[in-house]
């Protein structure tokens, strides 16, 4: 018997509810030794809509749940776990097979667990601009100037915009919330 991580399809939009239901059912049936961890990877995203800043949870892989399962030497899912999953509302099939699904690669598992622990850190900015986008500056000394996005720096929350001032193209660094798409 070995513990491996698997990807399970779940009803999109109900991943958290499915996870909660699975955790309760595993505990009720005493199968914690077979299904040790259930994850719905998500990240905290900070965005500005209509001038108001909001922080929200966003699913990294919508419609999927990750499970750490104890499987047989042949890679088969134990009957008790198989039937528990089949009888849980909102649960779909395993990605990569039915009774003997393909486990996640160790690199993928480490990345996934790293994303879950990073979630506790500061929210990730959601900057919806790309190079070449036309924008209008809505705040600061260049207010009401139009320009083109030259570079986006998500780590700092900055957008470099090329603005024409006195007939000359000039790059200006602005915070992402100071510009809006034209």
Image: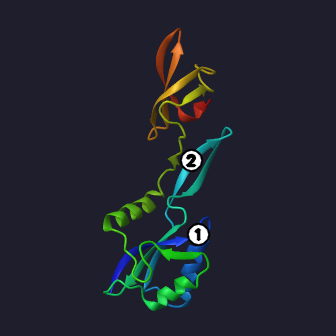
The quarter holding residue 126 reads top right
Q: Residue at x 44, y 41 (%)?
A: 155
Task: Pinpoint residue 156: horizontal percent, then vertical percent.
Answer: 45, 38
Give neighbour class at mark 1: few <14, some 14-19, many 20+ (Cα, 10 Å).
some
The quarter holding residue 143 reads top right
Please indicate, yes or no, whether residue 46 appears anywhere in the rendered image: yes
Work out whether residue 106 or residue 177 is closer to the camera in this orientation and state it.
106
Which residue is situated farthest in the front direction here?
97
Q: How many marks?
A: 2
In the rendered structure, the answer to whether residue 155 lies left or right of residue 49 reads: left
In which quadrant will I find the C terminus?
Answer: top right
Work out whether residue 99 or residue 150 is closer to the camera in this orientation and state it.
99
Q: Residue at x 33, y 68 (%)?
A: 105
| Image vertical order of residue 150 relative to residue 128, above or below | above
The scheme the figure's colours follow is: rainbow
The quarter holding residue 153 reads top left
| Image vertical order of residue 175 relative to residue 10, above or below | above
Q: Residue at x 52, y 15 (%)?
A: 164
Disc nearest the viewer among 2 and 1: 1
Task: Pinpoint residue 54: horizontal percent, then vertical percent.
Answer: 63, 47
Mark 2 falls on what kind of element? strand
Mark 1 falls on what kind of element? helix
Please indicate, yes or no, whether residue 31 appears anywhere in the rendered image: no
Mark 2 or 1, nearer chain start: 1
Q: Which numbered dot is residue 86?
A: none
Name the residue that disc number 1 marks: 16
**What whole-number distance in Å separates the C-alpha atoms at marks 2 and 1?**
20 Å
Q: Residue at x 41, y 63 (%)?
A: 112
Task: Pinpoint residue 43: horizontal percent, then vertical percent.
Answer: 51, 56
Q: Which numbered dot is residue 46?
A: 2
In which quadrant will I find the N terminus?
Answer: bottom left
Task: Pinpoint residue 123: horizontal percent, then vertical percent.
Answer: 51, 50
């Amino acid at each position: 018997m070995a513990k491996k991580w698997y990807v399970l399809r779940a009803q999109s939009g109900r991943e958290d509810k499915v996870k909660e239901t699975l955790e309760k059912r595993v505990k009720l049936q005493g199968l914690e030794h077979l299904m040790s961890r259930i994850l719905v990877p998500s990240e905290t995203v900070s965005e500005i809509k209509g001038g108001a800043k909001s922080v929200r949870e966003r699913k990294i892989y919508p419609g999927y749940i990750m499970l750490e399962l104890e499987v047989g030497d042949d890679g088969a899912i134990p009957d008790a776990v198989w039937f528990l999953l089949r009888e849980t509302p909102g649960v779909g099939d395993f990605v990569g097979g039915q009774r003997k699904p393909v486990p996640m690669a160790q690199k993928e598992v480490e990345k996934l667990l790293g994303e879950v622990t990073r979630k506790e850190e500061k929210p990730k900015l959601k900057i919806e601009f790309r190079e070449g986008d036309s924008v209008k500056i809505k705040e600061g000394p260049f207010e009401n100037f139009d320009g083109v996005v030259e570079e986006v720096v998500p780590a700092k929350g900055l957008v470099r915009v090329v603005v024409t001032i006195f007939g000359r193209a000039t790059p200006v660094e602005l915070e992402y919330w100071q510009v809006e798409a034209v």
